[in-house]
Image (cartoon, helix red, strand yellow):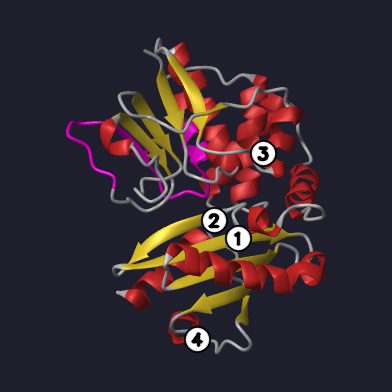
Amino acid sequence: MTTLVVGHKNPDTDSVCAAIALSDLKKKLGEDIAPAVQGELNPESKFVLEKFGVAAPDIVTSYAGKDIYIVDNSDLAQCPDDLGQANILGIVDHHKLGDVTTGQPLECWIWPVGCTCTVVASMYDFFSVEIPKDIAGIMLCAILSDTVIFKSATCTDTDKKICAKLSKICGESDLETLGIEMFKVKSAVEGTPIRELVLRDYKDFNMGGKGVGVGQLELVDLSIVDGIKADLEKDIQALKEEKGHHSVFLMLTDIMKEGTELLIVSDDESVVEKAFGVTPANGKVWLDNIMSRKKQIVPDLEKVFG
């Protein structure tokens, strides 16, 4: 039986590329293994895989009875719904430890770095396995994406060092240009259904027993969504009602201005002021120097929800 490597729901580039890279590494170490995703790839992920000629993982929706590795998360809300019926062999991640538990010891690599692919690239070194050019390319792109071209608060010196090594392997020397090229693809909204944009990089959380959703659109310019902002606001309100959540937030992150406009629908908007010290107006607030959901949005919200 083939072991599967899978990331979180609504896969982003790190989740996809980490699954592919970890599968490549484990295969070279003798495992029968393949990458998988829980849903459709977003435009940026498709661009990255096509750029380096890497096949997209199969979409797998059921993991019951399968051996699996989890990448880029360890939260039940983001894992497959039937995770309890799977056998978890390991977790490779760069987030806080979530609520996934196992009945047996597992291989666990969870590092405080900006991207899961930084951890996977380091695993190649640990096991003395050479990183192929195409795998180096997609891991490089994943790190540039997750660290917002090294501008995010999550970025570490380790991420930068790994990128320098990966860039030599894959032959991409101008990382700024590559990153901007990726974010232009990521910013594309024309012709995309509103709900698809809301869910493009969206995660659910349990905060103090209350459901909280946080989505993010990373844009090269906020004006890109001026014509659809009202529709985005309506849709996160509808999503909140559908899920029965306390709050749903959508981060509109301007990577050039290095800040985020936060769209808010909540049973109690004061949670935003308590978390970030800024009073919302008309269901939105500008958060200067805030670009990371993982490090700058979720932890402060979790403190407020308790």
Q: Which element carries disc 3, helix, strand or loop?
A: helix
Instruction: Please name the amino acid that badge 1 sits on.
Output: Gln
Please tell me in which quadrant of the rendered image residue 31 appears: top left
Q: Is residue 97 left or right of residue 228?
A: left
Q: How many marks?
A: 4
The stretch in magenta equals: 100-121
Task: Look at mark 2 in the image and give the residue it sits on.
Answer: 202
Q: Earlier in the sequence, mark 1 or mark 2?
A: 2
Question: How crowded is the residue under tag 4: few (<14 C-alpha within 10 Å), some, or many (20+)?
Answer: few
| Image mark for residue 45 | 3
**Where is the C terminus found, in terms of image quarters?**
bottom left
Are the two marked residues, 4 and 2, in contact with CB atoms closer than 8 angstroms? no
| Image mark for residue 277 | 4
**Where is the N terminus found, in terms of image quarters?**
top left
Picture coordinates of residue 177 (x, y %)? 81, 46
Q: Is residue 195 above or below residue 57?
A: below
Are the two marked residues, 1 and 2, in contact with CB atoms closer than 8 angstroms? yes
